[in-house]
Amino acid sequence: MQSSKSRYSSSKRNTAKASRTKKNSRRGQRGKRRWRLRSWPVLLGIILVAAAYIGVFYIYFVGPFSFRWKAMYGETVYPEGYDVRGIDISHYQASIDWEKLRNASMDNDPISFVIIKATEGTSLTDENFNENFYEAGKNDFVRGAYHFFVPGMNAAKQAKFFLHQVHLEPGDLPPVLDVEKMGNLTPAQLRRDVKTWLDIVEAKYHVKPILYTGYKFKMDYLNDSIFAQYPYWIAHYYVNKLEYKGDWVMWQHTDCGRVSGIRGQVDCNIFNGSMQDLKNLTLQEEDFD
């Protein structure tokens, strides 16, 4: 049997324990309140940082490329206010069903012109050029041919190689020079070599060749008054309007287009003018004198 002294001692210990538990509970509640008071600025800061990150991500990554994402998932966005449309092709488009392509449309407008890769550097001819060039003419497209310029290779030899491989006819577009890379050249050297190519080809056909390059590339390296006299074919993707303020004849607005007759994606272009303007741009009989 437990003694009264033992019972008292036990009761005292229980009371002390209960008191400590109560104090700890109050201390824990005060700690939680203090944590909540201290943590809400941290949580607010996290929320604000996350919101800012999402905003920056949208402005610099989602917004500028939303046109590309739409195009990649089958929703090609066509600039408004233009109805003369065309494509440019190379061996990357593989075998083309020209009958389907002849009856294809983009944004309910027919495909009016096809520009075909012909040559690159001083020795490379696109493996599908001859077939594509023939079929484009046979199927009543306004056709053109372009040379992919390789910086660092002899510009005169590149021009002569293009002229040897490509035989344009009345009704074809002027020759096209595609300039996209600097290589190891300085901007001055690039401009010199590009002008060499243009001069040699112009001497053959007596018309200014079309100069193709991207908006930023032109502004950085070819933004010289000497090139302002050439018809400009601008590559500027996934924007609903051009930032370029100068004159231009064609706009390659996406590389993710889809048209009947071509498996996979293709570059889509618009012409800055009417169908008659496009025909007026083409080579005439007198250009072959």
Image (cartoon, rainbow, N blue to C red):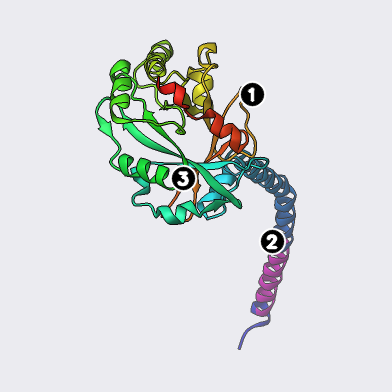
Q: Is residue 236 visible?
A: no
In this rendering, the label closer to the viewer, 3 or 1: 3
The C terminus lies in which quarter of the figure? top left
- Check the image and name the residue furthest to the left: 123
Q: Which percent across, then down, holds residue 182?
A: 39, 21
**Residue 210 visible in the snapshot:** yes
Is residue 15 one of those drawn in magenta? yes
Quadrant for the N terminus in the image: bottom right
Residue 114 falls within the magenta-colored stretch: no
Query: Disc 2 on helix, strand or loop?
Result: helix
Three-letter code for the amino acid on which mark 2 is drawn: Asn
Amino acid bearing label 1:
Lys
Pointer 1: what residue?
245
Residue 245: where, in percent of width, then height?
Answer: 64, 23
Residue drawn at x 61%, y 22% as measured from the top left = 246
Q: Main secondary structure of the magenta part?
A: helix
Q: Earlier in the sequence, mark 1 or mark 2?
A: 2
Above or below, comparing residue 139 to residue 240 in the picture: below
Give the Cα separation between the discs numbered 2 and 3: 91 Å
Direction from residue 128 to residue 37 in the image, left or right: right
Q: Residues within 10 Å of mark 3 (few under 14, many from 20)?
A: few
Please report the bounds of the magenta region as a residue range.
7-23
Name which of mark 2 and mark 3 comes first in the sequence.
Answer: 2
For the residues bearing labels 1 and 2, Cβ distance under 8 angstroms? no
Tell me which residue sits at (71%, 56%) in the image: 32
